Structure formats: structure tokens, C-alpha cells
Image (tube, rainbow, N blue to C red):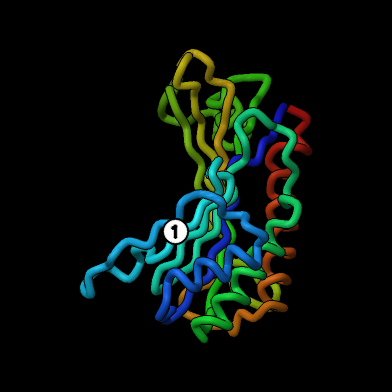
């Protein structure tokens, strides 16, 4: 069995990020991250009535390994694992420190507050059997009212406490197939989404953010262990 981290998304939520000089902020962030974002920046003109979730600034590395999106309400920082490399380890080395540096730049340049945070990871699992067989044998009753499903999905939500914050933890496991060869059905995609609940606000400063990311990583690793690594598939 092969477990491969495909994407990590780190998120900060704010009641309002007011950017007076987009170009200055983009240069400041890229300088702090030692020109990590060496692709062309995107800072489109945004009409006043545009949805607040639309990014006002998008920074990318040329290979799109790293992508940063800044809107009025949230900051998204993506890490995309190179497709040719299945050996990337989780947590990704230095990723959280980069996100901390971004949050500090935003706090210093825009004076915004961050009240919630999230981490979303996407995985590919290559099995020694079909994905539908794996889900059916591990999670379903023997008398389910269907036979030979082409695809199967498992979703569940738990409520946890991480870094002193109440969080939602979503886990979604579903079968997938190679686009080039749909007969290859021995793959699963796994999404683990941990986010602080919307009805409580926290002062997400540098200390709390790092604690949240580190403790969430342990939850994510434990989840992958329970579902896959400890099963000996």
C-alpha cells in the first residue's frame, strides 16, 4: 500500500483584510519568503460589489508547487506535491513556518485579525485490492442493498478540541480511477479537513496558529494510521 500526500491547504479567516497597496504587500510577502513565489503575480481589478471571497492577490511559484490567495475574508496557502515524487513526507518540511511568515506580513501591513483557521489535506492511497472492495469490507454491512458498486464514498464528521479550540473534523474517503485507464480501480482519495467552528472566534496569533497546525497534523496522521497503515493492506 502506498500513501501519498497530494495537497495541503492552510487557511486563515478574517472579518476583513483591507489592502491599501496590493503590489507593496505582494513584494513584502515574497521578500519574507525568499522569492518563493517566482511566478507572475495576479492582482486583478475588483469591482466594489464583487464577492468578498474572490482573491485580490494571487501569488504562485512557477511550477505551482506553492499558491497563495488573499481575499477580504480569508487567506489560502496551497502546497501541491510534485506528481513524480511519492516520497514527500507529512507534515511538509518548512510549510507551516512559511504560513506563519505570511500571517505576520499580513498582520503588519494590513492590521487585520484572524479569528479562525483550517488545514485541509488530500491524499492518494494505492491499494493491493480494488477501492470498492476495501471500503465495502472495512465499513459496510454484509447485507447492504446493492451489489458491485462502480464507486463508493465514506463521509463522516466528528467534533474535537485542538489547541484549546473547538473544531470540526471531516474525513472523506472515496474510490477513484486512473483517467488514462479506468480499469485501474485500486485507488482511494482521502480528504481530511480540520477547521475551527464558525460560531466561536479565537485570536489566532502566531503561537496559537503553530499549535493548531502541529496538533492537527497529529490528528491527521492518527486518522491515516487507523484507516490504512494499521490495517496492513
Q: Quadrant of residue 83?
A: top right
Confirm whether residue 168 shows in the render.
Answer: no
Task: List x then y, in percent, for residue 211.
Answer: 73, 71
Q: Which residue is at 75% across, 43% downward?
A: 89
Above-or-below relation of 169 to 5: below
Task: List x then y, in percent, for residue 170.
Answer: 54, 55
Q: Which residue is at 66% across, 70% downward?
A: 101
Element at badge 1?
Answer: strand
- The 10 Å Cα crowd at callout 1, few under 14, some 14 to 19, many 20 or more, is many
Above-or-below relation of 117 to 201: above
Q: Which residue is at 53% across, 70% downward?
A: 12
- Number of on-image labels: 1
Relative depth, front residue between 182 and 142: 182
Q: Quadrant of residue 20?
A: bottom left
Task: List x then y, in percent, for residue 54.
Answer: 34, 63
Q: Which residue is at 22% across, 70% downward?
A: 47
> Which of the image's four quarters has the C terminus?
top right
Task: List x then y, in percent, for residue 231.
Answer: 75, 34
Report whether 49 appears left or right of 229. left
Q: Quadrant of residue 164?
A: bottom right
Confirm whether residue 14 shows in the render.
Answer: yes
Above-or-below relation of 21 to 32: below
> Which of the image's four quarters has the N terminus?
top right
Q: Which residue is mark 1?
A: 58
Relative depth, front residue between 200 and 153: 200
Amino acid at each position: 500500500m502506498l500513501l501519498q500526500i497530494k495537497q495541503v491547504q492552510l487557511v486563515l479567516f478574517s472579518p476583513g483584510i483591507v489592502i491599501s497597496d496590493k503590489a507593496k504587500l505582494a513584494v513584502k510577502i515574497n521578500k519574507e519568503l525568499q522569492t518563493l513565489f517566482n511566478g507572475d503575480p495576479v492582482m486583478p481589478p475588483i469591482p466594489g460589489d464583487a464577492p468578498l471571497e474572490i482573491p485580490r492577490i494571487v501569488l504562485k511559484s512557477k511550477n505551482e508547487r506553492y499558491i497563495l490567495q488573499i481575499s477580504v475574508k480569508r487567506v489560502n496557502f496551497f502546497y501541491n506535491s510534485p506528481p513524480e515524487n511519492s516520497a514527500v513526507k507529512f507534515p511538509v518540511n518548512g510549510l507551516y513556518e512559511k504560513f506563519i511568515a505570511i500571517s505576520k506580513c499580513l498582520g503588519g501591513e494590513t492590521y487585520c485579525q484572524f479569528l479562525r483557521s483550517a488545514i485541509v489535506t488530500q491524499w492518494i492511497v494505492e491499494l493491493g485490492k480494488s477501492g470498492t472492495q476495501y471500503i465495502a469490507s472495512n465499513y459496510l454491512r454484509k447485507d447492504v442493498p446493492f451489489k458491485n458498486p462502480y464507486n463508493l464514498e465514506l463521509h463522516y464528521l466528528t467534533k474535537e478540541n485542538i489547541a484549546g479550540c473547538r473544531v470540526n473534523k471531516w474525513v472523506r474517503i472515496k474510490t477513484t480511477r486512473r483517467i488514462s485507464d479506468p480499469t485501474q480501480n485500486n485507488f482511494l482519495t482521502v480528504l481530511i479537513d480540520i477547521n475551527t467552528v464558525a460560531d466561536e472566534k479565537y485570536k489566532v496569533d502566531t503561537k496559537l496558529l503553530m499549535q493548531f497546525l502541529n496538533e492537527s497534523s497529529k490528528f491527521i496522521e492518527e486518522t491515516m494510521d487507523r484507516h490504512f497503515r494499521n490495517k496492513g493492506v
